[in-house]
Each structure stands twice: as structure tokens, then as C-alpha cells.
Image (spheres, rainbow, N blue to C red):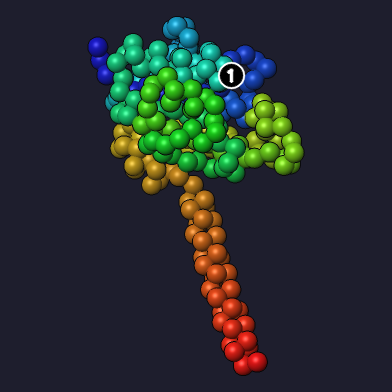
Amino acid sequence: MDSYYIIAGLGNPGLKYDGTRHNVGFKVIDELADRFHIDRPVRFGKSMIGKGTIGGEKVILVKPLTYMNLSGEAVREICSYYKADPADHLIVISDDVDLPVGHLRIRKKGSAGGHNGLKNIILHLGTDEFTRVRIGVGGKPAPGSDLANHVLGHFSSEDRPVIEEAYAKAADAVECAIGQGPDKAMNLYNTKKQKKQKKQKKEAETAEAASEVGENADINSSAEGI
């Protein structure tokens, strides 16, 4: 059997979920299908799939029909049938509430990070070694608000242009991961601002620690003089 890249965008089926934060994976699949003229989707087991090529490589675009929390059933079914090694030929696209709206994070392996769809995929595949493209949808509007309502809600008019741009960038990242490898995609498409923020936070923490050391030294000197 020919070797295919399996590109699975996560989401919930049905019109009521179209355009919700949890369905950004489906939107990127739509973007890829339009951009690369992928075959019209057909039903395959627990998914809708479309076959085509991206960068000269054969691909299968997948939208699981299992609902988010059982995504692993559909992804395992496709990978098993097409004998795709997840570490080399699986790319999963999902939402991420820990990232600001429109930010991207690409990784080659790792935990589910609290995402039930990814958690179920890891469970059914028996490995966390597969490329994932995570798209920021922003956190809960308030600490006490319900996370389910947030991810099943729609983007604000202010966020809509930002997320639309993110769909295109995520599709770019998938194309890059297939053609040049996940490491290149990570270097090019992981949101740099996120890295800068982490660096600034670390520098601030270091400066604060140094300040505390200085204050303690002053206190000790005063104590010794009494």
C-alpha cells in the first residue's frame, strides 16, 4: 500500500459546532482541501476523508466524526488501515486554550496538555510521538467561567480576522512539515512572540531574585551593625 501522510483536524461534527473554538482543526482541513484541490471528502469508517497530494507527497485529510473526546478511535482506524507510522506520517491539528488567539505551537511529541481529543489519540495509538499543530483560541474570559462553554463558543468579531489568518498559517505549517520536516516547521511557524514572552518573564524573575538577594544582604549588614 502506498505511504500516505495522515492529516487529522480535530473538531465536532454538525452545523451547530461549525466555527466554534474547538473546531479550528476542521477549518484548517478545509483550508488545505481548497488550497491543494484535495478530492471531495467521502465517508471512511468513523471519519470523512479526502485524498490528494501536498508538495508531491500523498496525503489523506481527515475529519473524525466521533466527536472530540473520542477522536482517537477515528485516527487509529485510519493509521491502522493505511499502515501509517504516527511518528513519521501523522499530523494532528487542534485548538489550544493556553495560547493567545491565533498563535501557533508545533511539536513532534508530548503530553495532551489537557486536551481531551489529543489525550484520546495518545490512548488509542499507544504513543505521544506524532506531530501536532496547536492553534491558540485564548483562555476562559473569567476564572470562574465554564471551559466547555468557552471552547464550544464562537469567536468574537474582533478575534475572527486573527483566527482566519491563523488557519492559513497552520496550513502553511502543515505543508512545511510534510515537505521539509517538523523541525523546520517549528522554527518557522511557532509563534515567536510566545518565546519572547517566556524569555522576558525569565529575565524579570532573575532580576527580582537578584534584587531580593541584595535586599537580604542590606538587612544582614544592618543587623550586624546593631
Residue for point 37% across, 27% down:
127
* Image quarter of the N terminus: top left
Image quadrant in which you'd find residue 102: top right
Horizontal and vertical percent for residue 204? Answer: 56, 65
The answer to whether residue 47 is visible is yes
Q: Position of residue 219 (x, y in %)?
A: 62, 82
Q: Residue at x 60, y 27 (%)?
A: 22
Secondary structure type for disc 1: loop
Pinpoint residue 53: horizontal percent, then vertical percent: 34, 21
Q: Position of residue 198 (x, y in %)?
A: 51, 55
Residue pictured at 53% horizontal, 73% vertical: 210
Q: Name the one closer to the observer, 184 or 128.
A: 128
Comparing 58 with 128, the one in front is 128
Q: Can residue 27 be seen in this view?
A: no
Which residue is tagged 1? 12
Disc 1 marks a residue whose amino acid type is: Asn
